[in-house]
Each structure stands twice: as C-alpha cells, then as structure tokens.
Amino acid sequence: MAQQTPPTEEQAASLPFPTIRSIGVGAPFRWIARGFSDLKACAIASLFYGFCFTGMGLLVTIVFSRAYQYTSAVTTGFLLVAPFFAMGLYELSRQRQLGEPCALLPTLTVWRRNLSNIAVFAAVLTVIFLIWARASLVVFAMFYTQDLPTLSGFLSQVLSLENLEFLLVYFGVGAIFALLVFAVSVVSIPLMLDRNQDAVTSMIASIRALLENPLPLLVWAFLIVSLTLVGFLSFHLGLAVLMPVIGHATWHAYQDLVAPLPD
C-alpha cells in the first residue's frame, strides 16, 4: 500500500534504498487490467489527461505534415512530457488505493510534492531528448534518400521496408534512446511522489528493477509501445483512453516492483 502522507525531506534523506521485488512475466497484463479499473472509477479526471494526450498526438501529426524531419523531435517531446502528464494519473490511482474520492484539482499540482527532485529528473530526460533530436536529424540527413513524404507515404515506406538502410539506422538509434529513457523511468516518478525519494536513487532503483526483471519489463515496454501506437493509428482518439490506462498501470507497476517501507 502507498503511504498516506509522503515523508518530509529530512525523513526522505534517511530512507533505505528501495527494495526491488521479482515479478512474473504476466504482471504487466495485470497492471493494464488494474489501469482500466482505475480509469472506470476515476473516469472524468482520467479522461481530462487522456484528451491532453490526444491534443499532443494531433500536434505530432500537424508537424509531420509540414516538416517531417522534425517529427522525431516532436514525438520524443511527446514521450518526454508524457511521464509528467501521467503524474496526475499516478495520484488518482493513489487516491483510489487509499479509499479517497478521485479529485482532479489536487493532481494538477502534485509535482510540488517533490519539486526539486522531479526537476532534476526532468533535466535528465531533457538532455536525452535533445541528444536524440539532434541524432535523428543527422540520421535523416545521412540516410533518407527519397523525396519529402506525406504521413501515409512515410508509413507505407516503413511497412514495405523501402529505404531499408534508413529504417534500420533510424529505428536502431531510436531504440537505444528509448531503452535508456525506459530504464531510468520505470518507477522513478512514482517513487519521488510516494516517498519523496531523491531523483538519483529513484533512477538507480528503476535501472535495478529492469535488470532484475528484464523479461517482464520488456513485455511491459512492448505493451506501452503497442497501446501508444494503437492510439496514434486511431486518429489519436484512442490516446484519450489508452494513455490514462498506461498511466494508472504504471502506478500499479511501481507498487508491485518496489516493496513497501518497513513499519
């Protein structure tokens, strides 16, 4: 169970390193089921965040239609901002877990609970984002040999494996950055919100969680990517439901992966 009151900074400084638990390969599917349950229980507040994600998805499409070479940067920005939008969803799951009513307003400023460490984490993700944005432009410049595509044209190239060298390099480099972001963020923000844990410890705990549960968490990463892709391919409308489900499920992933503090 989550703590009812997060520890103060002084108490957080004396917290033991989070104990990571081993989970089964089926755990990510349970998290998704619990995420759907939280969505149904907190529908109005959850869908508020869901439509924010839909708006971000539409922005990606608009940028692609006008300047495809910046789409990777904007898409990465989407993935960068998503964990911070999801903070409100974590808090909604936490409220429900404690038997409290699902209240949207307090979740809008939940980041204030541990602002300094969340800011450090944001800075780390921003650096990764900036490096990837530059790397993606370099890959486009070096390997993309065809005319400027439309969105459908680009997707058809991906599905038909045209310009294979570009696709291999682009998705290979992107996968490295995606794995890095995933590794440092599996349980980072929930830890910082729930325990007032510092950013460095939270990121190390996330990396350890991945190292100790590689197969289940790779399944979890696959589910996140798959559901996000479904959301994009449904004219972004699916994001309104699927992204809140992922956000709520992430809270339950944290609950399973990190042992409670000793009494």
Image (cartoon, helix red, strand yellow):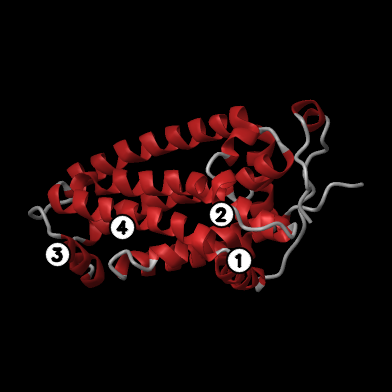
Q: Which residue is mark 1?
A: 38
Q: Give the residue drawn at x 39%, y 53%.
A: 52
Q: Position of residue 165 (x, y in %)?
A: 24, 57
Mark pair 4, 1: CA separation: 38 Å
Residue sitting at x 33%, y 49%: 75
Gap in Å between the C-alphas at discs 3 and 4? 18 Å
Q: Which residue is mark 3?
A: 153
| Residue identifier under label 2 | 89
- The amino acid beneath tag 2 is Leu
Kindly report which numbered mark, 2 or 4, lies closer to the viewer in this rendering. Answer: 2
Mark 4 = which residue?
168
The residue sitting at 50% across, 67% down in the picture is: 223
Say whether disc 3 or disc 2 marks the residue closer to the N-terminus: 2
Q: Amino acid at mark 4?
A: Leu
Asked if labels 2 and 1 touch by Cβ distance under 8 angstroms, the answer is: yes
Instruction: Say which quarter of the image contains residue 155.
Output: bottom left
Q: Is residue 228 visible?
A: no
* Amino acid type, residue under disc 1 in the picture: Asp
Count of all numbered marks drawn on residues in the image: 4
Q: How many residues crowd around disc 4 within 10 Å: few (fewer than 14), some, or many (20 or more)?
A: few
Judged from the image, the secondary structure of the residue bearing numbered disc 4 is helix
Res 164 visible? yes
Mark seen at residue 194 = none
Marks 2,4: beta carbons within 8 A: no
Q: Quadrant of residue 55?
A: bottom left
